[in-house]
Image: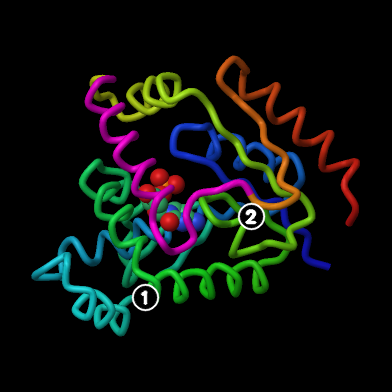
């Protein structure tokens, strides 16, 4: 049986760190769905003439070979794991994530990845609402936006004010978009990481996992 623990929430809420830790504790695979949007954004950033031309962007899917293995991301066999983390690519990813047809393509890719690889901790906006609405456990992890900005600025070594501006811009676009906006799924457990250490959150989720029904 394929068991799925899905974690949703805004950027900087600690989703990735928590999801990686949980995957290692449970002996599960780890899938960062945001990386799949970032991977396509990377291709689009370098290959598209006009990032607002949806037809042109969708045509790029024909030459898009995406691989995700051991937490590394490959686009057309090139390791782009580091490059997709830049602020440029973050903004493009949030933009292209509004395209309905691209979302369907990536959601199918994510579902097939889990089917092929087996039990997984899957992380990203819409993983609890659209990708795996029947996951055994669904978590919505959130935190105060100042704390999220501070965490991200330490991670990417940029000043907190510009990071906060970017985070608020992305939050608003991700929450207000027509297609699969960021929201709390039915039956999801909401956890606030503002005043908590990662260890505490991981412990809390492991307890919830043990008492959840397979
Ligand atoms: O989680 P992240 O910051 O790496 O995600 C990058 C962008 O991808 C984010 O702005 C929104 C989009 N995304 C999405 O729409 N659905 C997901 N399941 C994951 C990410």
Locate residue 73, reporting x and y percent: 41, 58
Residue at the location (28% across, 24% down)? 157
Q: Nearer the viewer, mark 2 or mark 1?
A: 2
Query: Which residue is labeled 2 in the image?
Result: 128
Provide the secondary structure element on which disc 2 rests: helix
Precedes in sequence: disc 2 or disc 1: 1
Query: Which residue is labeled 1 in the image?
Result: 65
Is 107 within the magenta? Answer: no
Label 1: few (<14), some or many (≥20) within 10 Å? few
Q: Which residues are magenta?
A: 160-184
Residue located farthest toward the left when viewing the structure as drawn: 49
Distance from Cα at disc 2 to Cα at disc 1: 25 Å
State left or right for residue 50 relative to residue 172. left
State left or right for residue 59 relative to residue 207. left
Residue at the location (61% across, 42% down)? 19
Rendered image quadrant of residue 98: bottom left
In the rendered image, the vertical position of residue 190 relative to residue 73, given as above or below: above
Residue at the location (38% across, 56% down)? 177
Residue at the location (47% across, 55% down)? 181
In the rendered image, the vertical position of residue 15 relative to residue 55, given as above or below: above
């Amino acid at each position: 049986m394929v068991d799925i623990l899905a974690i949703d929430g805004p950027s900087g809420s600690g989703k990735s760190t928590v999801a990686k830790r949980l995957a290692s504790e449970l002996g599960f695979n780890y899938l960062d769905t945001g990386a799949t949007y970032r991977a396509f954004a990377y291709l689009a950033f370098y290959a598209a003439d006009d990032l607002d031309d949806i037809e042109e962007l969708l045509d790029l899917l024909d030459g898009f070979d995406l691989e995700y293995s051991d937490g590394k991301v490959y686009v057309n066999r090139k390791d782009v794991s580091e490059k997709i983390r830049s602020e440029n690519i973050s903004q493009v990813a949030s933009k292209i994530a509004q395209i309905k047809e691209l979302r369907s393509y990536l959601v199918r890719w994510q579902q097939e990845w889990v089917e092929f690889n087996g039990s997984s901790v899957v992380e990203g906006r819409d993983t609890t609402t659209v990708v795996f609405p029947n996951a055994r456990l669904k978590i919505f992890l959130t935190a105060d936006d100042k704390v999220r900005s501070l965490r991200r600025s330490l991670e990417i070594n940029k000043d907190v004010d510009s990071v906060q501006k970017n985070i608020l811009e992305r939050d608003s676009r991700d929450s207000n978009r027509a297609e699969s906006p960021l929201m709390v799924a039915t039956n999801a457990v909401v956890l606030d990481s503002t005043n908590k250490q990662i260890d505490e959150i991981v412990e809390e989720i492991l307890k919830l996992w043990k008492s959840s029904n397979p």
